[in-house]
Amino acid sequence: MELRTLRYFVAVAEELHFGRAAHRLHMSQPPLSRAIKHLETDLGTTLFHRSPAGVTLTDAGHTLLHEAQALLDQADRIRAKLARATITVGILADHGAAALAAAFRRRHPHVEIRIREADLTDPTCGLRSGQVDVALTRGPFDSTGLKTLVLRRDPVGAVLRADDPLAQRDGLTIQDLAGRDWFQFPEGTDEIWQSYWNGGEPRRGPTVRAVQECVQSVLWNGTVGLAPLGHDLGELKVVPLADMPPSPVVIAWKRDDPLTRAFVEAATQAYGSA
């Protein structure tokens, strides 16, 4: 049995109509009918009951359908694994990816890893638009239609200028920052993402797109923003916020192909041992 013939059989078995199956396979009906007849001859059994109303599967047909679908799925996975030699990874402001990069290179030395550094306007790093295969990013954001896995949770603090009176405190609350200008992301940015980095309330302030724009806005204008603790922001201070939930470091993807799954598994192990 050839894989091509099995694909013909599966199309007819799923459509239960030779005409529709031929249309789905982008071929004419006579050669499709001949291929199925040859398959039945090779197997020495009838796969379809034929009638003017259409076709139905015989018991042998049901058995072959189950086996053929599994075999074709496996063939597709093998083909994808062999054909694909690159993976594009979107990264959004996470400094803990060194262990992941090393681990993935060790296991897949022949895979080319392309990196797309995302700005703050798209927490999926281009995943929805197909610009990347997998995203190493931060939450929370709208994950509808995506697969996500939390790798780590980082406490968050207020980003302040060193001479700001609040910068001398050991800890703050969101209420301590009331009345201040906060960073804003451009119109159309994920609402869940925007709300989180605004402390859960509507705010006013300058629009920023990148981490360095945030830093400069604090230095020059005294704007308030939030950032994960432990990040080096130069002359600025990050004071812990007691009433902010932590920001999760997340890996997100859409397609469960072998290379993407391998990257997700490497991330799980790398961050689990960090």
Image (tube, rainbow, N blue to C red):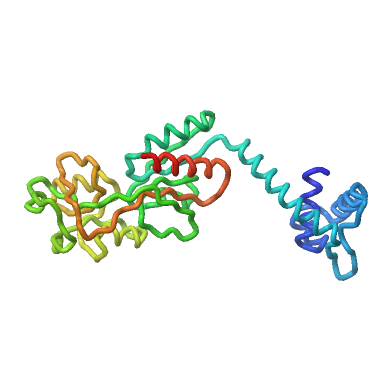
Residue 21: quadrant of the picture: bottom right
Left or right side of 133 for 76: right
Picture layout, residue 18 above or below residue 228: below
In the image, what residue occupies the spot 34% across and 39% down?
96
Q: Can you say whether 133 is above or below 61 in the image?
A: above
Q: Nearer the viewer, residue 196 or 132?
A: 196
Q: Residue at x 17, y 54 (%)?
A: 224
Residue at figure coordinates x 16%, y 44% from the top left: 236
- Residue farthest toward the bottom in the current orientation of the protein: 53
Q: How many marks?
A: 0
Instruction: Please tell me in which quadrant of the rendered image residue 98 appears.
Output: top left
Residue pushed farthest front? 273
Residue at left offset 32%, top offset 40%: 95
- In percent of width and height, residue 154 lies at 29, 49
Image spot of residue 147 (x, y percent): 48, 54
User: Above or below — where is 111 with respect to 39?
Assistant: above
Q: Which of the image's four quarters has the C terminus?
A: top left
Task: Give percent across and percent down for residue 48.
Answer: 87, 60
**Depth order, front residue of 237/122:** 237
Where residue 235 sits: x, y (%)? Answer: 14, 40
Using the image as rendered, state which of residue 185 and residue 148 is in the foreground. Answer: 148
In this rendering, position of residue 69 left or right of residue 185: right
Q: What quarter of the picture does the N terminus occupy?
A: top right
Instruction: Name the image quarter holding residue 82.
Output: top right
